[in-house]
Amino acid sequence: GENVEQHPSTLSVQEGDSAVIKCTYSDSASNYFPWYKQELGKGPQLIIDIRSNVGEKKDQRIAVTLNKTAKHFSLHITETQPEDSAVYFCAASSNNAGNMLTFGGGTRLMVKP
Amino acid sequence: NAGVTQTPKFQVLKTGQSMTLQCAQDMNHNSMYWYRQDPGMGLRLIYYSASEGTTDKGEVPNGYNVSRLNKREFSLRLESAAPSQTSVYFCASSTIGTGELFFGEGSRLTVL
């Protein structure tokens, strides 16, 4: 089955700096790659996703890049703000797996004011 | 719109006790899921229900049972709780094809 590795497990940045979280996946059939943000005491919430026919996608201060050849994808947050502090999860799925998501282990991002 | 509602939010059990986690969604979604979240291990799928009347095992189904009561409700039962089932449990729902999961706020379970 699919295996998703996520790095780093914790990331501390100064407000205004950029943050990058990286994920690798094992199943070459995976074609959907979402990112979820989990705030303290809440359930995860989708913030951005990308499909395998696209190399990059942006939404205001966040962007996701995908390299299918290398089987890795990354989340980029620019001009970080304290409210970006949360746990971020990457995930991958494929039609072959019934579109079931396999999640990475999570990254705790701390943005220091 | 409440979205996905889970009860209870907190529960402490003794080893061997049983309990049921309840989940309901009001978004008319077809698919529902139960995940567990453990430190450093992300979210792991326990069971899912692609549509009303069907249920299937996920990655970590041992020790759990589920019931899709109707389109809105999907419950998770622990028949004989074990300390290894101490975790935070999340229910989620989705429409077919969109890929986006909508999560509840979680149920924190401690088994002593």
Image (cartoon, coloured by chain):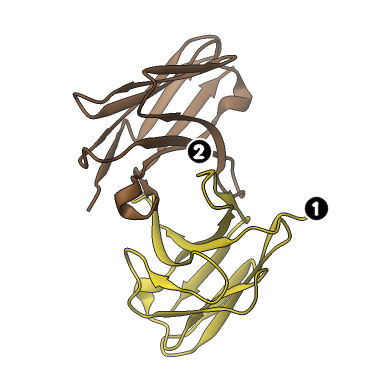
Chain letter, colour yellow: B
Q: Which mark is residue A110?
A: none
Q: Residues within 10 Å of mark 2 (few under 14, many from 20)?
A: many
Q: Are marks 2 and 1 in contact (CB under 8 Å)?
A: no
Residue at image location 49% in from the left, 27% down from the top: A110
Which residue is farthest right? B1
Relative to B94, say whether A4 is above or below.
above
The answer to whether dots 2 and 1 both sit on one chain is no
> From mark 2 to mark 1, how far is it between C-alphas?
21 Å
Query: In x, y percent, where is residue B40?
Result: 34, 48
Q: Drawn colour of chain A?
A: brown
Q: State the residue in front, B80 or A33.
A: A33
Q: Secondary structure at mark 1?
A: loop
Q: State the residue in front, B76 or B25.
A: B25
Query: In x, y percent, where is residue B52?
Result: 57, 72
Residue at image location 33% in from the left, 67% down from the top: B60
Q: Secondary structure at mark 2?
A: strand
Query: In x, y percent, where is residue B35?
Result: 46, 61
Q: Which residue is mark 2?
A: A36
Q: Which residue is mark 1?
A: B1
Give the chain letter at badge 1: B
Residue at image location 40% in from the left, 26% down from the top: A11
Amino acid at the residue labelled 1: Asn
Amino acid at the residue labelled 2: Tyr
Q: State the residue in front, B14 or A39.
A: A39
Q: Residues within 10 Å of mark 1 (few under 14, many from 20)?
A: few
Query: In x, y percent, where is residue A82?
Result: 61, 23
**Is A24 left, or right, of A54 in this rendering?**
left
Relative to A38, say whether B83 is above or below.
below
Give the chain letter at badge 2: A
**Is B26 left, or right, of B80 in this rendering?**
right
